[in-house]
Image: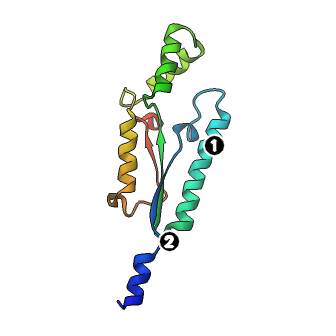
Amino acid sequence: MDGAALHRQETEARGTIVNLASIEAILPFKADLAAYSMSKAGVIGLTRALARDYGRFKFRINGILPGAIRTPGTTRLIKQALRGVRLDLLQTGYDFQRRLALNRWGMPDEVARVALFLSSDLASYVQGAIIPVDGGFLSS
């Protein structure tokens, strides 16, 4: 390889993008979330289109679909449902929990580890993938 070709190779654009969507993009589960579900489906479309268009520039672009992740927001909703403040969530929460093949909620670091994998050289040939991190929700 001559010096000019080596320089071009070293200065080529490259990078990794990991987008976050939601399991609601694939399987809308909770009522009254149409706008949210639609926006997350858009993230999937954006991820795949960018992966197609920018892979040739050495950008790897993938997405994660979190679901049933224990966060301060989800913890607050669970407490409200159990205290009777949000009775509308009791049946939804019960039905949601029954779909979790691992029978537990995930932690934020479990999503972060998938993002770390997708950002690392371990995923050097992963492009345009949409990976659920949902305890088996979408497979149940």
Q: Is residue 62 above or below residue 140?
A: below
Q: Residue furthest bottom?
A: 2
Q: How many marks?
A: 2
Q: Position of residue 89 (x, y in %)?
A: 56, 17
Residue shown at the point (35%, 30%) measured from the top left: 102
Of 3 and 33, the residue lying toward us: 3
Residue shown at the point (39%, 55%) measured from the top left: 119
Q: Is residue 115 above or below residue 6?
A: above
Mark 2 element type: helix
Residue that carries the numbered disc 2 in the rendered image: 57
Q: Position of residue 31 (x, y in %)?
A: 63, 26
Rendering quarter of residue 137: top left
Q: Amino acid at mark 1?
A: Ser
Mark 1 element type: helix
Q: Position of residue 61 (x, y in %)?
A: 48, 58
User: What's the coloring here?
Assistant: rainbow
Q: Which comes before the other along the chain, label 1 or label 2? A: 1
Q: Amino acid at mark 2?
A: Phe
Q: Is residue 59 visible?
A: yes
Q: Is residue 36 above or below residue 11?
A: above
Label 1 neighbour load within 10 Å: few <14, some 14-19, many 20+: some
Disc assigned to residue 39: 1
